Amino acid sequence: MAFKSYVLVCGGTACQSSKSEEIYKNFIAELEAAGIKDEVQVVKTGCFGLCEKGPIAKVLPDESFYVKLTPSDTKEIVSEHLVKGRPVKKLLYQGEETKKLAKIEEIGFYQKQFRIVLRNCGVINPEDINEYIARDGYAALEKVLFQMTPEQVIEQLKISGLRGRGGAGFPTWLKWNFTKEVNDFPKYIVCNADEGDPGAYMDRSTLEGDPHSILEAMTIAGKTIGSNKGYIYIRAEYPLAIHRLEVAIQQARELGLLGKDILGSGFDFDIEIRLGAGAFVCGEETALLTSIEGERGMPKPRPPFPAVKGLWQKPTVINNVETWASIPVIILKGGAWFANIGTEKSKGTKVFALTGKIKNSGLVEVPMGTTLREIIYDIGGGIINDKKFKAVQTGGPSGGVITADYLDTPIDYENLQKLGSIMGSGGMIVMDEDDCMVDIAKFYLGFTVDESCGKCAPCRVGGRQLLDYLEKISKGKGTREDIAKMKQIGNAMKRASLCGLGQTAPNPVLSTITYFEKEYLAHIDDKICPAGKCKALITYSILPEKCIGCGLCARRCPVNCITGEKRQPHVIDQSACIKCGECYSVCKFGAVARK
Amino acid sequence: MTTVTEPVKLTDGLQQFIAEWKDRPGNLIMILHKVQEEYGYIPRQVAIQLSKELDVPLAKIYGVITFYHFFKLRKPGKNKISVCMGTACYLKGGEDLLHELETLLGTGVNSTTDDGIFSIEAVRCVGCCGLAPVLMVNSEVYGKVKKDQLADILAKHRES
């Protein structure tokens, strides 16, 4: 039976954490109470991407886009919109750019996006295989099983120009072809869903919103290279994604799309989930394979590459979630279609997790070649509180910062590398004038030092030394020679480390030194932190001429180090001050100075 | 540290899981996940028992446990607070939340309050960057958390 309207409620992790599950249930209950439950279908979908404005619900067919809902709003939407046909204006997305009520296609956040990987996220119910099939799901697999030879599949991938989305950008067809050519069985297919970059969650959303696209693509790879077994290695910290994958695998098996004799083709393929356990280095392919084997996730020297000796020393194709999700579309629409999108050397689209000091935090998918300015200002809506843009960090702990001067650079693998950063998995973190670059470098180094597996000395020792220098500088004890030393160590790590973690770990340090050397020198020569972040270098004091003695700061001070008579200027006891900044943020009269 | 020597009885769920996974290659990490799901951490006695049942040296089991951040050797509190320290949360004040929690609970990161009700942990990105700063109490996610909300959040879980 056809429904008159549909309510799509976002069931992504971010929206679920703000009660979208309750909203979903309330919609069903309210529709039943209104007596129209046979006319309106409520669907729990994957992520819509605009996480900043969650929880989100979309009403079809008129595409009304409701944001920041609470469970009690459902009553009004049902009685006004779905019963009487009058959208509830106060709950609709208010387009800041146009100051008018927006439908989804009018929202700036979505206008410049082009969705291939996220094509089904926020559209289908990820726990119902039939909805995936209705959107051409498993049609690519059927084509590969019955109409294409393995050579043709690889040829299409080659034409498409698809490169690995996990970070390094290795051509996908080449990886598949190497594995296909090796005459050693069994072979394995692996999905890298160990999304460890802090500040990136595109893989999580893809798996939660469209798990079947991954299963379909892995099966296609199995048929192409001659493998009957796939593994999905996923972070244990992603329980919802794991659950949706389990449901998807079960449903695919029931319909004969996984398991023995898929669709009567005689081809067998099955997929098993393996859990990661919180080790960033396991995003590196050789370390990941060691972890699937149940061992400590230490990387191995390459060659031999996994294509020749991978999981259990057998030929293995390993790709990242986003790469897998692009493949069914390439097979269906053809490599040439995909190659039409993007730049000369980087084809297709890329998903970024746009976060940090940005108005519209969320997931965005754009054609390669889109500029950073378009992503940050047109899609992201600019900087929170209209502060000054300082830098954008891409590639997480393996990447670097990019400054305002380069905002018009078209994004592709080569351009980002030239700027001293990398594409990485797609984290894109926007920083404003309040963020200190020494502190940011220290944050990332603290992360990589903690995550270094310790197998090779350049990473184990070099990372520690870099961190020590950064700590010294942030305390105002650094010297100019320290900067030269950091460059020397960083470059040595790049050349001598065993795996990608150590080779890229110095990037955040080297790129902040390149673009913000002045800020380092301010810490070193003048002993000040211009952004006011490095605690050892700042002091808070009360300006007597501005203080009215309201006592708010004294009451809020966690260590009770502010004293003064009522209606008289107060004083901070510097010896006891822990520099938490509470007084600075609560003072309504600008009477607390930070230097 | 207490030293108990008699072997422990593994929970039924765990025994069943081990039986199912025993002969599959690369099973150790999956079994350790199950142990942690059942006990909240990996008790030494259970690790010893596993070593016998799987015929894997205890040293290897500990090698794996200590390599991965996810596995815990100490019992967590009744309510596990995980403060996200991903980049987005860090920039938006995740560290301040952590310090405030430490002050409110009178205990440091990676430790449990004396009454065993709360434990605090700093975790890697939980994948809700749009809601930064984020913290989780058990499996409940709190987004866009402000310092002055922490007391209420704690009170809510203290009672339950």
Image (tube, coloured by chain):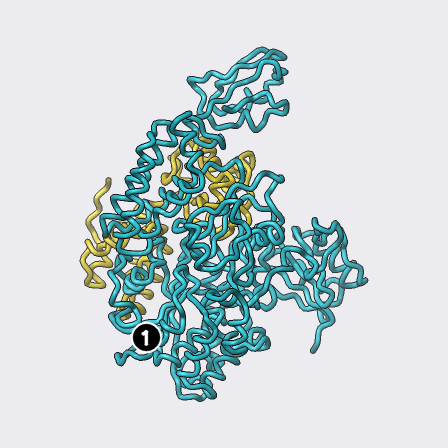
Q: Is residue A348 left or right of residue B2?
A: right
Which of A488 and A184 lies nearest the eye of the viewer?
A488
Q: Looking at the picture, does residue A429 appear above or below residue A363?
A: above
Report whether residue B160 is seen: no
Which of B49 and A539 lies nearest the eye of the viewer?
A539
Q: Provide the residue designation for mark 1.
A: A178
Q: Colour of chain A?
A: cyan
Report whether residue A135 is seen: yes
Q: Is residue B40 left or right of residue A405?
A: left
What is the x, y in percent for residue A280?
Answer: 36, 53
Residue appearing at x 20%, y 61% in the figure: B56
Q: Looking at the picture, does residue A543 appear above or below residue A373?
A: above
* Subunit ID for the residue under disc 1: A
What is the x, y in percent for residue A107?
Answer: 68, 56
What is the x, y in percent for residue A83?
Answer: 78, 63
Q: Looking at the picture, does residue A486 appear above or below residue A192?
A: above
Rendered image quadrant of residue B117: top left
Residue appearing at x 27%, y 58% in the figure: A299
Q: Residue flagged by tag 1: what amino acid is it? A: Phe
What is the x, y in percent for residue A53?
Answer: 62, 51
Q: Colour of chain B?
A: yellow
Which of A201 and A182 lies nearest the eye of the viewer?
A182
Label 1 element class:
helix
Residue appearing at x 40%, y 83% in the figure: A150
Residue appearing at x 37%, y 61% in the figure: A275
